[in-house]
Amino acid sequence: MKTVVTGGAGFIGCHLVRRLLDQGREVVVADDFSRGDARRLREFSVDLDPRPVDLRDYHQTHEVIAGAQSVFHLAARVGSVEFLHGTDRAELVALQTNLVIDANVFRACLEHNVPTVVYASSVSVYPIAPQQSMGAVFAEDDAASVDPEGGYGWAKLMGEIQLRWMTGIRSGIARLFSVYGEGEEPDETSHVVPAIIRKVILTPRGDFPVWGDGTQTRDFLHVADAVEALIRLESAAAFPPVVVNIGSGAAVSVREVVDKIVQISGKDVRPVFLGSGHVGPRSRTADITRMKTILHWQPRVNLDDGLRRTYTWIEERLVQPLQP
């Protein structure tokens, strides 16, 4: 069974590839292998012979998807709040890049009659205004009010709409919340968990800066749980698409995460909350009722264990970088 994973050398993708290989599948990774992704794929999956694929090029996309029985479409321009939403140009690049990638992948799936597609969508499709108030919880039907978060959110929403018109293809749409874990590079494009861990590790003692006031909340989900949900969603795929939130269902403040990371480090360091900068929405949490019902599953990795595993991986990465 040929399974194509677009973005398969990325943070979530490399973990998904490993799980699929463990199931005995023939896995093809469709990725451009930028930013050291080939190295990460070797670390978490196997030493595949990576062949770069530019999914912005339809000819390359058409070739790599030929013969696939299943496609996990994870490839996208992703990153931190600053990286995706810091300027109007950043918003435009995220929108245009992701629209092109999605259009090429979905067109190729239609032309090759791929039976099943699992699409990595995002919490960003939900209306942004309610996310500026604390305690915002979103169920799948809440996306009916259209006001997604910037260019990235608009692109993901357009991806979902395309799948609803792809008659004959079973699909599952995974609205991923804040996925964290081993494998996300601790650099300027990182999300909140690796960014904070990086600061703690690189601060010998004393203060380190954190954007925002620490009260903003997120729904954190370890990458192992995200991968399990994606695989289960493949089995539940249907037409019209099955849409589920993929999250923990718990709202956790950034301050709580920072405190846990400092405790894990054992270092004499203290966060200084700057109260400004690009911190994104104030609050957003997944209603995971539908996920538990359809996937017959709920997350297994608790936050303390997940943060400890992530801290150890990033510490090894920063102290003893892997050779290319």
Image: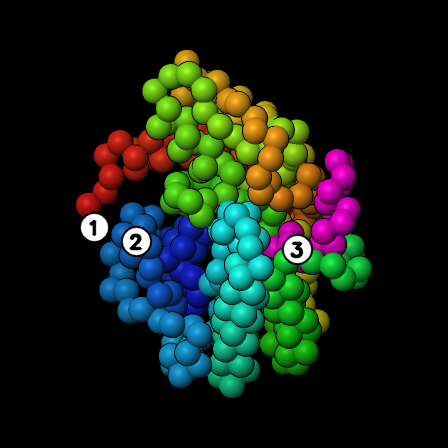
Q: Earlier in the sequence, mark 3 or mark 2?
A: 2
Which residue is found at the position 69% from the left and 58% from the top?
Answer: 148
Q: Secondary structure at mark 2?
A: loop
Q: Tell me where residue 64 sits by quadrant.
A: bottom left
Asked whether the beta carbons under mark 1 and mark 3 sit within 8 Å of each other, the answer is no
Which residues are drawn in magenta? Answer: 122-140
Residue, far top: 268
Specify whether residue 6 is painted magenta: no
Question: What is the quadrant of the N terminus in the image?
Answer: bottom left
Closer to the camera in the image, 216 or 72: 216
User: What residue is shown with label 1?
Assistant: 324
**Is 102 rendered above or below residue 150?**
below
**Residue position marked by numbered label 3 in the rendering:** 149
Could you tell me how many numbered marks the image carries? 3
**Residue at left offset 45%, top offset 37%:** 195
Q: Looking at the image, is mark 1 or mark 3 earlier in the sequence?
A: 3
Residue type, label 1: Pro
Residue under numbered circle 2 = 36
- The residue type indicated by label 2 comes to Gly
Label 3 SS:
loop
Q: How far across and how far down the image is residue 103, in percent?
A: 54, 76
Please state which of the two labelled residues, at mark 3 or mark 2, is closer to the viewer: 3
**Mark 3: amino acid:** Glu
Residue 306 sits above or below residue 25 on the image: above
Q: How many C-alpha atoms fall within 10 Å of the one at disc 3: few (<14), some, or many (≥20)?
A: many
